[in-house]
Image (spheres, rainbow, N blue to C red):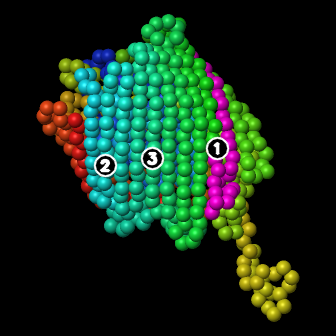
Amino acid sequence: MRTVVIKYLHSFAAVALPILFGGSLSAGPVETLTVVATRSEMALDALPEAVSVVEAIQIRDDQASTMAEVLENLVGVDTAGGPRSSAQSVVVRGIGGSRVLYTIDGSRQSFDGGHRGRFVLDPSLIKRVDMLRGPASAQYGSGAIGGVLSVQTRNADDMLAADELFGIRYTSGYESAGNQWTNSVMGYASLVDFGVIAQRSQQENKDYRDGGNQRIDHTADQLDSTLLKLSYTPESNHRISGLFLESTQRNVSPSNAAKTVDDSNPLLNKENRSVNTSIAYRYQPDRGYLNGLDINAYKNRTGITEDRIDEIRHDTIDFNTLGANLTLRLQANERHRWLVGLDYHRDTSQASRNNAPRPQFPDARQQIQGLFFQYQADLGQRISLISALRYDQFKSHSNTHAAADIHESQSTARLGASFFATDWLTLHANYTEAFRAPNLLENYAAGIHFLGNEFQPNPELRPELAANQEVGVVFSGDNASADRRWRLRANLYRNDIENFIETLVTVEENTLNIACLGPNPPPGCVFGTISIDGTTTAVNLPKARISGWEVESSLEQGQLLAEVALGHSRGESLSDGRPLLNIPADALKLHLAWDSNQWRLGARANHYRRQDRVPPTDLNGGAVAPTAGYTLLDFYARYQPEQIFMQSLTVTVGIDNATDRRYRSHLATLNSAGRSFRLGFTYQL
């Protein structure tokens, strides 16, 4: 442990020390704002929680084609599932899957389909991503044990200059890994009180190859997306908006897309269609006790079809979420602010196999409603407090199994404090709770899992609970005369989790009855076979603890930008001291960039240490392999020539994994892609 800290601090000091002792200090720099941590707008460094932001311009510079690439440079954030995008899910501080709440424009994305990924979205549609690290159920209810991933799509106002009424943008990109092509066309306009934006994008790639030039089978993929967004602003403080977002992903991959094909993981022809619709209303009065009102109603549908390649088997899944949330912001003055809100969502699922009911994905429903209250107070000029309390009820019912209905409730709380010691030093302390209600698969899955093994429903599952303690420090400042701006944030956290839900697979083998091979086998004897009896069921595990620290630092000096991020996490079962299974490797992430009027040149180096802190076996008795350390080096450039008339052109080039490193992420079983050359251009009229 000591060696790890010393090694990383030595690398960090090369950038951090010039930042800390780089000149005289004045008031801190203007900070990025976020609403994801408190559901009301606050500066990042004023929050006791840790939040990272990825803007659209960074997504464009990196030419990100998957959500994994959008998030890969954030501290404390990893992606599980491997190179197949249909298997990918985000992992925050060692916690992933449905334990990280995922929203699009404020609408909850509830679908969690076993081995299926959660991201069916083209990054070119994204305006911004806010990533809250740590439990947040007091704000968001069930699911936010690891954090909150908030995605915002583009509006017409984001694309138009002050004197423009309409515009068109065309984007095309090529990536040598998988011979991937991406094309997108967008139109947007603002007429009187109305705004509209429409975008259609297509992305297609063939199989990737790893750094050893070995084909990574069944990584070919196709993604089509459509975005339509309307807004109406009858007065300056009223706004109504509507969203339609459709994404369709097609590929041929194994049933469990994170693993290789074998007899128990057959090859399927898959189509995953996701449709998100919502209507939102915002009211922001000019004065008075009412500071704002937000209402959002939404419906999300995920429709999946899977056809087995080697036999006639047609599977379908239909998963729907209907929800609404209301947030009321009140304030007596600038120092005392309240937030009151209501959340409701209802998930329903059903599935079929060859047009017959399929209990492996149960015909079931779950509804959750919550009431929350938040109070923020500024005590003088130096201390800020944030407290919140939430109460949720959830109910679950299965139509295809005799398992009992579930009626449960859960309360969660948070308390955070920030001490603004000086203009350049802020101290944070934070306590947050979270819970996750068991999902429909965990409670009610039934039927055959694989030959000789059956799902067993478990309606007795307890909700997962988390309690996180965190302290942090922020150093920040700028020197206008030297054109220098710097920032450093460090966090130390400990997250205790109870009733963690995992899937337990048991297999019992009965020895072959030799008498069955004789001329007179006994009654009931099965001739020449081995009987295998096993079950697959979700169970609650004993208490576990995940702890660690994170450091983020940035320096802007004239046209130069330097960023450093370090993430370190450890997880153990408190019952026996065994390491937890899916804790990511320690990471050091560096970013250097140079800007001019027309150019931006950048380089990234991400180093992941060897991860050998693994349990001897997984929950099902399988061996767990350690992961070797590796370093990835990326380069990118953006060029924007002088505008001619109303025409604007942007050209981006890049090299990912420039050294063609052959590697496997610790949260994957397959190798990742090798060297990839990227080229893209955007033409805007």
Position of the C terminus, as image quadrant, is top left
Instruction: Find disc 3 in the rendering and name its residue.
Output: 247
Residue 440: horizontal and vertical position, in percent?
A: 66, 46
**Image quadrant assignment for residue 146:** top right
Q: Secondary structure at mark 3?
A: strand
Is there any visible trace of residue 193 in the rendered image?
A: yes
Please tell me whether residue 360 belongs to the stretch shown in magenta. Answer: yes
Q: Which residues are magenta?
A: 349-375
Q: Residues within 10 Å of mark 2 (few under 14, many from 20)?
A: some
Residue 344, image x and y in percent?
A: 62, 31
Q: Main secondary structure of the magenta part?
A: strand
Name which residue type carries label 1: Thr
Q: Amino acid at mark 3?
A: Ser
**Nearer to me, 627 or 679:** 679
Q: Are marks 2 and 3 in contact (CB under 8 Å)?
A: no
Mark closest to the chain's N terminus, 2 or 3: 2
Residue at the bottom extreme? Answer: 519
Task: Name the residue beneath numbered marker 2.
Answer: 183
Q: Are marks 1 and 3 in contact (CB under 8 Å)?
A: no
Q: Residues within 10 Å of mark 1 (few under 14, many from 20)?
A: many
Q: Horizontal placement of 420 versus 530: left or right?
A: left
- Image coordinates of residue 46 in percent, x first then y, are 44, 22
Question: Tag 3: Cα neighbours inside 10 Å, few (<14), some, or many (≥20)?
Answer: many
- Is 677 left, or right, of 344 in this rendering? left
Assess whether mark 2 and mark 1 are in contact (beta carbons under 8 angstroms): no
Write the residue at 54% across / 72% down: 310
Q: What kind of element bears circle 2? A: strand
Q: Which residue is mark 1?
A: 348
Task: State the residue at coordinates (27%, 53%).
Answer: 174
Q: Earlier in the sequence, mark 1 or mark 2?
A: 2
